[in-house]
Amino acid sequence: MTPPKVTTGGTTVLVVDDEDGIRQALTRFLTRLGYNVQAAANASEALAKQAEHHPQAMLCDIRMPETSGVELLPKVLAQDADLAVLMLTAIDEPRTAIECLKLGAYDYLIKPVDLEELELSLQHALRQRQLEVDRRELEQWLAREVAVRTRDLEERTAAIEEVALDALAAARDWAGTDAALSRLAEELGSPREELAEELKRRRAGA
């Protein structure tokens, strides 16, 4: 089964490469695919473009003057941990590839880049990014729901305890008090001794 294509409309890709020709060619290609493209010639420009345009993905050359792509990678991920990053290089260096993947890059492509491979890798990276974002949002929603339901349950439990103890306090001579306290403690998950002490206090204050 072929996975659904990622919708490119509204998706911004940051292209970082110090070679004008490659940067322009990638920009034209990605624009034809429907992506919004921002381009940067170096690391400092890339960080500025990222802060301004908040891209969802980045294509980054590894060998650049001053700050390399490997050095830039943790910096852009520090600004946006969900950024889908594809690293590009003209030299096939397995150690560098492994380092980039360990630092958080999604893929590592060798120049000259096969455009079909680039398109597929970018789609997969964006799909993986969206799955991670959706997973985290679901976990946050579940945590909020659990907190709300737990609070509601605690409030209902406290209300039941109040009503039951008030009723037992009023029924001073009822022979079933001990059995009722045991059942109440079991249902509420509360220590029977604490309930008995609270009942004694209420009867004394009545």
Image: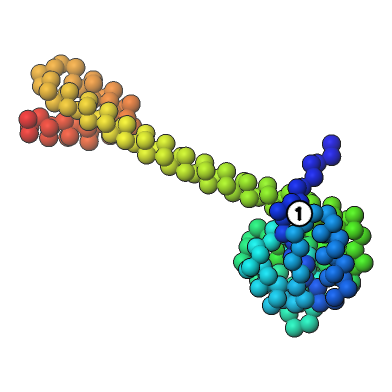
Relative image position of residue 25 (x, y in whole percent)? 88, 67
Please report the residue visible at 20 percent of the width from the left and 22 percent of the height from the top. 178
Quarter the N terminus occupies = top right
Q: Residue at x 33, y 26 (%)?
A: 187
Q: Quadrant of the C terminus?
A: top left
| Up-down relation of residue 181 to residue 194 (above or below) | above
Against 199, residue 102 (above or below) is below
- Where is mark 1, residue-wise? 125
Q: Is residue 5 above or below residue 111?
A: above
Count of labels in the image: 1
Coloring scheme of the render? rainbow
Q: Residues within 10 Å of mark 1 (few under 14, many from 20)?
A: many
- Residue 194 image-quadrant placement: top left
Residue nearer the viewer, 119 or 166: 119
What residue sits 90% from the left and 58% below the top? 115
Please state the horizontal and vertical placement of residue 103, each as a whole percent of the image: 70, 66
Q: Is residue 204 left or right of residue 99?
A: left
* Residue 71 shows up from this direction: no
- Residue type beneath disc 1: Ala
Q: Residue at x 85, y 57 (%)?
A: 32
Note whether residue 90 is visible.
Answer: yes
- Residue 127 image point, x, y percent: 73, 49
Q: Quadrant of residue 109?
A: bottom right
Relative vertical location of residue 141 with respect to residue 16 in this rendering, above or below: above
**22 or 154, which lies in front?**
22
Quarter of the image where one finds residue 97:
bottom right
Which residue is at the far top? Answer: 175
Q: Secondary structure at mark 1?
A: helix
Q: Is residue 164 left or right of 17 when viewed as pictured?
A: left
* Image coordinates for residue 75, horizontal then vertical, percent: 65, 71
